[in-house]
């Protein structure tokens, strides 16, 4: 078994309204920044043990499917590195 | 024979639900989620509140507690199940009903009376109403915006699974009458069966005559 860190990034699907990102964008603009757009995402760093990187990715993917993301509104990606 | 009102840490409409049901002469009692269900409940309410502090997403944690498996089993056996507000978020997170409830378009918590148009009167939850009837019930949520893919929304419409839509006092379903940006103004939907429903507005807060309007009684009468 090897120690891995799986990074799961969960973001809203394209086209799904993100009121918090819009509010953040407006606050940045009030601070004088100029920006075209802003998107937010949640990042989870999961430390786990697995036989290989593929097994670690499979575990993290199941975590995303079953809890970390809501498939109705979210897309996610998983990246695995050796810890 | 009793309606179980499931309490999680952070539920706060559980007592209101019991009081409203008892006002209608329906036996109801609060059940702590870890105590589980007995299996002979006559109905189940998943009440409003902020279970698990809305961590991750509203309803996400409660939807993955063991009692939800029992709620599923009861629903499949024909027991009426109603999720209100946080209960609606739990129901959709747990797959009892379609779609998702997420951050209001305003990005704010909103607590206000709204008008709802009865879309489908042929369900236990709407049998007290006529099709197109306008009722007044309060909302109180920060994450009540109904989201669903266009394809799934079309299926819901075709299958008559939408219970209520936000409307103005005249019954017109308009963008201005949509308090939270919900897709197609949807305020409440049915699950796979007619006896499973979720809605963001609070019928239990519109059921006691001493407090104000009582249109919510019609929804709760499904448990009679």
Image (cartoon, rainbow, N blue to C red):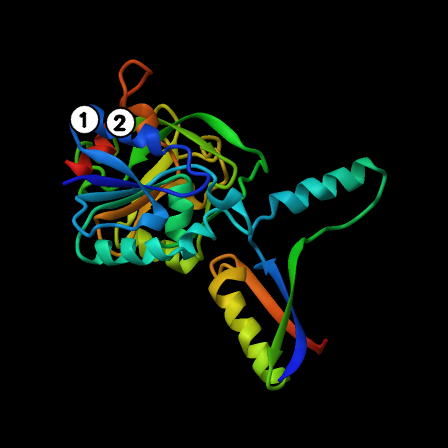
Q: Residue at x 42, y 44 (%)?
A: B184
- State the image coordinates of residue A14 (x, y, percent, origin top left): 59, 59
Residue B142 seen: yes
Using the image, tell me which numbered label, if any, was put on residue A50: none
Using the image, tell me which numbered label, if any, was put on residue B24: 1
Q: Secondary structure at mark 2?
A: helix
- State the image coordinates of residue B75 (x, y, percent, origin top left): 23, 54
Most foreground residue, B193 or B93: B93
Q: Residue furthest front?
A: B35
Q: CA distance from mark 1 to mark 2?
A: 7 Å
Q: Residue at x 48, y 27 (%)?
A: B111
- State the image coordinates of residue B8 (x, y, percent, origin top left): 40, 43
Please determine whether, in this image, residue B221 is positioned above or below residue A47.
Answer: above
Q: Residue at x 36, y 23 (%)?
A: B169
Residue linked to disc 2? B20
**Marks 1 and 2 in Cβ contact (< 8 Å):** yes
Q: Residues within 10 Å of mark 1 (few under 14, many from 20)?
A: some
Which quadrant holds the C terminus of chain B?
top left
Please determine whether, in this image, residue A66 is positioned above or below residue B181.
Answer: below
């Amino acid at each position: 078994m090897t120690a891995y860190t799986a990074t799961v990034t969960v973001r809203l699907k394209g086209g799904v309204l993100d009121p918090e990102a819009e509010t953040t964008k407006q606050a940045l603009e009030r601070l004088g920044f100029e920006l075209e757009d802003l998107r937010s995402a949640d990042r989870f760093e999961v430390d786990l043990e697995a036989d290989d990187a593929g097994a670690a990715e499979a575990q993290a993917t199941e975590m995303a499917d079953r809890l970390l993301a809501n498939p109705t509104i979210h897309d996610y990606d998983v990246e695995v590195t050796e810890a | 024979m009793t309606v179980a009102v499931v309490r999680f840490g952070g539920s706060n409409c559980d007592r209101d639900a019991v009081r409203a049901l008892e006002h209608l002469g329906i036996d109801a009692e609060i059940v702590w989620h870890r105590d589980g269900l007995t299996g002979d409940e006559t109905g189940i309410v998943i009440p409003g509140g902020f279970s698990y502090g809305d961590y991750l997403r509203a309803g996400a944690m409660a939807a993955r507690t063991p009692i939800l498996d029992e709620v599923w089993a009861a629903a499949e056996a024909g027991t009426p199940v109603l999720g209100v507000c946080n209960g609606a978020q739990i129901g959709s997170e747990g797959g009892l009903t379609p779609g998702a409830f997420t951050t209001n378009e305003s990005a704010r918590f909103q607590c206000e009376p709204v008008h709802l148009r009865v879309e489908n009167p042929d369900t236990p939850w709407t049998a007290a109403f006529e099709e197109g009837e306008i009722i007044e019930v309060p909302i109180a949520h920060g994450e009540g915006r109904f989201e669903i893919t266009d394809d799934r929304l079309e299926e819901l419409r075709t299958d008559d699974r939408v219970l209520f839509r936000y409307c103005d006092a005249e019954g017109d379903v308009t963008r201005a009458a949509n308090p939270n940006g919900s897709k197609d103004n949807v305020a409440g939907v049915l699950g796979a069966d007619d006896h499973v429903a979720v809605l963001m507005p609070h019928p239990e807060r519109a059921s006691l005559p001493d407090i104000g309007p009582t249109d919510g009684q019609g929804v709760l009468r499904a448990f009679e």
